[in-house]
Image: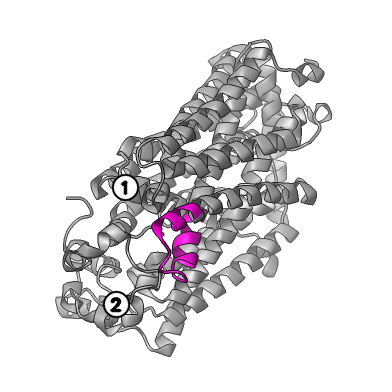
Amino acid sequence: MDPSDQKFFTVIDYVIFAVLLAASMGIGLYYALSGGRQRTTQEFLMADRSMGCLPVSLSLIASFQSAVAIIGVPAEIYTHGTQYWFIGCAYILGLLIPAHIFIPVFYRLRVSSAYQYLELRFSKAVRICGTLTFIFQMVIYMGVCVYTPAFALNAVTGFELWGTVLATGLVCTLYTTLGGLKAVIWTDVFQTVVMFAGQLAVIVVGVQKTGGVADVWRKVWEGNRISGLDLNPDPTERHTFWTLGVGGVFLMLSLYGVNQAQVQRYLSSRTEKEAVRSCYMVFPSLQLALALSCVMGLVMFARYCGEDHSDKLASSSRDAMVIYFVMDMLHGLPGLPGLFIACLFSAALSTISSAFNSLATVTMEDLIKPQYPAMTEARATLLSKVLAMSYGLLCLAMAYLTHLMGDSVLQVALKIFGMIGGPILGLFCLGMFFPWANSIGALVGLCAGLVVAFWLGIGSILTRSTRPLPLECSANATIAIQTAFNNITLSQPSGLKRFYSLSYMWYSGFNCTTVILIGLIISFLTGPTKEEDVMPGTLYPLLGKLFCFLPEHLKKKLCCVTPLGQTLAAPQRQPSQHKEGNGLAFPQEDRSSLEERESFLPETLVGKPAVS
C-alpha cells in the first residue's frame, strides 16, 4: 500500500470525527443550561452527588483508558508478546481494595477532595504537600495525553499537528468549564462506547484481511508472541506474572484508590452502595478494554511480522506504527478510519477532561478555600470554572513542551506519572492503616518516597534499554530468542545498575513501601500519635483484621483496634483540625449533620462491612 494514500480522509471520516467533537460540546452545553446550571461548587465539582453506578463506572474506565493505552498496549504486544496481558490479574485486588476500604472511608467523611482526608488525619501541611504532588503528576500526564495521539496521527495521516492539539484541548476545556463534572461523566460514557466500537472495527477488518482467525493464530504462535506464565521472581525482569499481577495491584490502587480523578467519581454517586457497585462494574469493562487492545496487537503482528515499515512513517515510534496498521486495515472503507480516530481522541478527551475537573477541585478545596473561607458560593463556582479553563490552557502548553523535548519524553513522562502515584498511595496507606503515624512522619515519608522515586526513575532512564523480541514470523524465531536470552543472562547488571533495572511495574509498590517505612520510623522517633488523638472515621482497622488470630489484649496493644467510638472527644482536643475557615469544613449542606456522622463513623468503619 502506498503510504501517501493514507494522507487523505474521505468526507465521511471528517464528518464522523466532527460529530464526536460536536456531541461532546453538546453534552457540556446541555448541563450548562439545565438543572442547577452549574451555579454551585457542589454541582460543578461533585455533580450534586446524584450520579448512578453505570455512568460512574464507564467514566472510571475512560479516565485512565487514555490514547496512550489505546495505541500503547497494541504496540507493547506487537513488540514484546502477550505477557502484558497478565496485568488483568491485578485488576481483581486493584478494584476490590478500593471498593471495601478507600471508598467507605472517603464517602462517609463526605469530603470533596481526597486530600481533605490528609488534613483530617494529619495536618494542613500534609494536605497541601499531597495536593501539590497530585497537581504536578496530572499536569505532566495530561500534556502527554493530548500530544501523543496528535503526534502519532500526524505521522501517518497528515492531520495538522497543532490544529489537532488545539481542537482537542479547546473542545475539552470548553465542555468541562461549561458543564462541570456531570458533563465530564456523561461525555466519558459516550466516548467509552466510541472507543470500544473503534477498536472492534479494526480487529474484525484486520482478522479478515490477514486471512482469518486460524492464520492470525498460526503467525503469532510461530512468531513467539503467545507468552506462557512466567513465574520468574526476579524483580528486574520487565514483565513477569509477579511484576504484573502483584506490582500491578499497587499501580491500580494508586489510580483507582486514591487518585482524585477517580475518588471524585465515587463521591459523585448517590449513595455509598452505588459507589461500591460502580467499582465492581469497572472490572469486566477494564478486562474487555485490555483484551481488545491485546488482540489488536496480535492481529497487527500477524499482518506485519518480519516487515519493517519505519521508512514509510514520519516517525519510527511504535505508536505511529499502530496508527499505520489501522489506516492500512481500514483504508478504502469509508467512515471506519474516522471511527477509529474518533475512538483515539475519545480516549484523549475523557482523560484530560477528568484531569481538568479534578485539578480544579483540589486547587479550590485544598489551596483556595482554606485561605478565603468567607468566599461566596457564586464567586467560588466562577473561580472553579476559571481554574478548569486555566488548567486546559496549561495542558496545551505542556503538549508544546512535550513536542520540544522529543519522542523519548513520552516514555519519560509516563514513568514520572507512575513514580509519583506510588508515594501518594503510600501517604494515604500510612494514615489509614497505621494509627501511630504522625504528621512529621507523613511529611518526611512523602519527601523520602519522592526522592527515591525520582532517583530510581531517572537512573533507569539513563542506564536501561528495553529488549524487544525478534520480529521473525517463523520457527527460526525460537533460536533467535534463545540466543538473546543467553546473552542477557551473561550480561546481567550488578550493583547500582541492578537497582536501576527494577521493573517499572514495581515502582508504585516500592515507592509506596518506602513512604510507609520511613513514615513509621520517623513517627516513632518523634513520638507516635496516640489512638485517642486520631479523628474518628479516618482509620481502617487493617492490622486488626490481619491479626485476628491474636488474643484481644494483644490486638488492642499492637494493632490499635479499640473502637473509635470511645474517642469522640478527640476532635475537641485538636481544635486546629476542626475550626472554621481552615478549608477542612465539609460541604455547606453537610455541616449540620457533622455530629451525626461522627457518631456512626467509627462503628461502621470498624464493626461493619463496607456495604450494608
Q: Amino acid at mark 2?
A: Val
At x 24%, y 46%, the residue is: 273
Specify whether residue 237 is in view. no
> Which region of the structure is painted magenta?
360-382
On screen, residue 510 above or below 351: below
Rendering coords of residue 302 (x, y %):
64, 23
Q: Is residue 105 left or right of residue 608?
A: right
Rendering coords of residue 197 (x, y %):
50, 23
Q: If the image is split into quadrants, where does the N terminus sit?
A: top right
Within the magenta stretch, is there residue 128?
A: no
Disc 2 element: loop
Query: What kind of colouring is applied to the model shown?
Result: one colour
Q: Is residue 273 left or right of residue 226?
A: left
At x 59%, y 19%, the residue is: 16
Give the quarter of the image for residue 8.
top right
Name the one closer to the observer, 104 or 217: 104
C-alpha gap between disc 1 and disc 2 = 27 Å
At x 62%, y 32%, the residue is: 224
- Give the foreground label among 1 and 2: 1
Q: Amino acid at mark 1?
A: Arg
Q: Which residue is mark 2?
A: 534
On screen, residue 295 above or below 14: below
Q: Which residue is mark 1?
A: 49
At x 31%, y 82%, the residue is: 574
Rendering coords of residue 602 (x, y %):
20, 67
